[in-house]
Amino acid sequence: MHELSIVAGLFETLSAQARENRAARITGVTLRIGRLSGVVPELLESAFDMYKKGTIAEAAKLTVEVVPLRVRCRACGAERGVESYVFLCAACASPDLEILQGTEMILERIELESDDA
Ligand SMILES: [Zn+2]
């Protein structure tokens, strides 16, 4: 399962961040996932819930935001969001499109909590 290895990597980042900030626990995590990243948000959420047990993020809530696909036409320079998988420029019908966003996964936000507040 692809999502499980992503979550394993994510938890390494999370625990490093928590250590750096001397946090006692992580209460929330927000991820942005490109529509073309190949990641299924539901699978990612269930992998996260499975993985977090017994960790510093045991009580963390995962929020997944899906980033729409955005392309630019190399022929005429038009930019637009893509809803369907029709890879032709809407302005000039060229198939020469550059993908601007929609394939990435970004750790957008971590909410931390410490004991000595
Ligand atoms: Zn075009």
Image: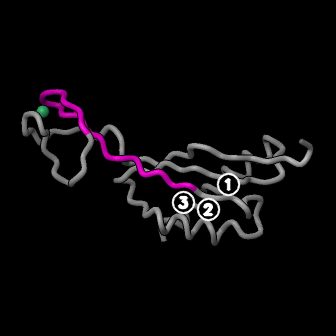
Please state the extent of the stretch shown in magenta in the rendering.
63-80
Q: Nearer the viewer, residue 90 or 72?
A: 90
Q: Is residue 19 above or below residue 46?
A: above
Looking at the rendered structure, the kind of residue marked 2 is: Ala
Residue 94, image x, y percentages? 9, 38
Residue 103, image x, y percentages? 37, 48
How many angstroms separate mark 1 from mark 3 (CA)?
10 Å
Residue hosting label 2: 8
Q: Residue furthest left?
A: 93
Image quadrant, ligand 1: top left
The residue carrying pointer 3 sits among few (fewer than 14), some (14 to 19) or many (20 or more) residues within 10 Å by Cα, namely some
SS at badge 3: helix
Q: Nearer the viewer, residue 113 or 33?
A: 113
Residue 90, image x, y percentages? 12, 39
The residue carrying pointer 1 sits among few (fewer than 14), some (14 to 19) or many (20 or more) residues within 10 Å by Cα, namely few
Mark 2–mark 1 contact, CB under 8 Å?
yes
How many angstroms separate mark 2 from mark 1 (CA)?
7 Å
- The image quadrant of residue 95 is top left
> Which secondary structure dominates the residues rendered in magenta?
strand
The residue depicted at 61 percent of the width and 62 percent of the height is 8
Residue hosting label 1: 12
The residue carrying pointer 2 sits among few (fewer than 14), some (14 to 19) or many (20 or more) residues within 10 Å by Cα, namely some
Which of marks 3 and 1 precedes in the sequence?
3
Looking at the rendered structure, the kind of residue marked 3 is: Ile
